[in-house]
Image (cartoon, rainbow, N blue to C red):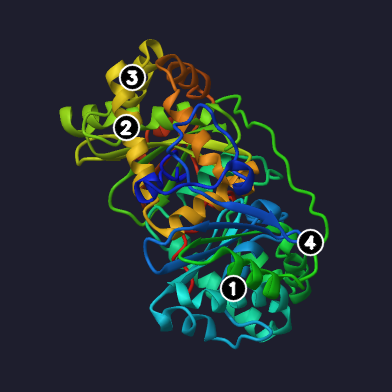
Amino acid sequence: MFARRALAIAALALAGTAAPPPAVLGQATHPSAAPELRIPYARYTLPNGLTVILAEDHSTPTVAVDVWYHVGSKNEKPGRTGFAHLFEHVMFTGSGHVPYGMHDRYTEGVGGGNNGSTTNDRTNYYETVPSNYLEDELWLESDRMGWLLDALDTGKLDAQRDIVKNERRQSYDNRPYGRAGEIVSGAMYPDDHPYHWPVIGSMTDLSAASAEDVKNFFRLYYAPNNATLAIVGDFEPAEAKAWVAKYFGEIPRGQAIVRPTAGPVTLAAEKRLVYEDRVQIPRLYVTWPTVGVRRDDQYALDVLGAILTGSRTARLTKALVYDRQSAASVFAYQDENELVGQFQVIVIPRPGTTLTGLELAADSIIDRLKREGPTARELQKVKAGLELGAISSLQSNLGKAEMLDQGSVFHGDPGYFRTDLARTQAVTAADVKRVANRYLTNGRVVLSIVPLGKLDEASKPEASTRVSAVPAPTSTIAGEDRP
């Protein structure tokens, strides 16, 4: 969503600070965005291909180091899944010159923090520390980029493999509604689609992976030419550049990477599924295939989601939760990956309300929006809310680092947040109406999750196919998931 894409409205913190000229900063020009919406940054590339982004902010004596590797589950192959997320764990077990446990001592031990996260499209590792520890953090990140395999043995790999399997049990297999994402994506994406399998991987693949399989994956994707390093906060650029060259400069460039491709996904007809789970209350998921982060329709779809749910006056929220009181909660949002995306509506019923009735009511409300489009007042309110959400998510050095990395990796422009903001603000009522009619069609996946033995509680149970084994598609692992 727009708010999650982290538009960096750092002018709040940088007001009155003179920015160096764009030619020095490497900052792209976006004439449609307000000139005050900028974060001064410098971007350069080392000879080995590492992209470096520096953004000074001396408002607090802290600094964030955020490394993005342009690799996620979509870079895996059927039968060899879960490697990207496995490395999220392995990267914290020590490297050639950093014994196990030292990474935490050099971050948490000085009052900072560190973690990592994995998605379909990228993996990141980050630290936030008092600024006088910046050199230590750069050394730590460089050591696991260049010398991780020196310390990786079969025992460490097997231990982390077991941890990931247990995480799979906790977050998917034994968690109420935990398999919803797998079922939906398995029905939406073909078997060979890069978003078909889950980020966490399958138990079978994790068990079958050899040490050499895993090491080869690391050698290809965790090289400097596939990484972007953002340093944001209280530091001196000349000093930071010297440290980056000192610690990262000797790491050799990796092989050229052939990235997966995937065209738009369309469904010829509606797919209706029902899954029995250990839950007390049924839940409805309606999902349509949409576009990825490089397609302009994402902005109107973001606005559409906020018009339908979120605030008390949003259309689905107002009608189902407050006016009719038939739903306990309802969510609608655009969720885009790098190549493709999906728009999803989730409805949780109140007692005495059927999923069939809720689906029909939600469809009726969406159909009206498709016919009439949103009002001017709705547009104004939603855009203001999305902008506020973006500002709120960018109040830390790490938040700004994430935004700069994201723009650089997916758009080749760390300052892409300005384009994001301008294009969201430019969405019209006609745009919202158009994308609603284009994407919210009968080509969708409708999943009912019901209590064990209560298949009749599904939405339109007679037309739904029972899911007994979960196929393997896509999901996102949150950042706070390593031991």
Q: Secondary structure at mark 4?
A: loop
Please name whichever residue, 146 or 93, is drawn nearer the observer in this view of the structure.
Answer: 146
Q: Amino acid under label 4?
A: Pro
Say the numbered circle drawn on residue 364: 3
Farthest residue toward the top? 372
SS under mark 2: helix
Marks 1/3 in contact by CB < 8 Å: the verdict is: no
Between the residue at mark 4 and the residue at mark 1, the CA separation in whole angstroms equals 18 Å
The x and y percentages for residue 59 are 37, 60
How much space separates mark 3 and mark 2, taking CA atoms?
A: 27 Å
The reply, left or right, for residue 131 in relation to residue 213 is: left
Which quadrant of the figure contains the N terminus? top left
Query: SS for tag 3?
Result: helix
Disc on res. 384: 2
**Residue type indicated by callout 3:** Ser
Residue nearer the viewer, 342 or 404: 404
Q: Are marks 2 and 1 in contact (CB under 8 Å)?
A: no
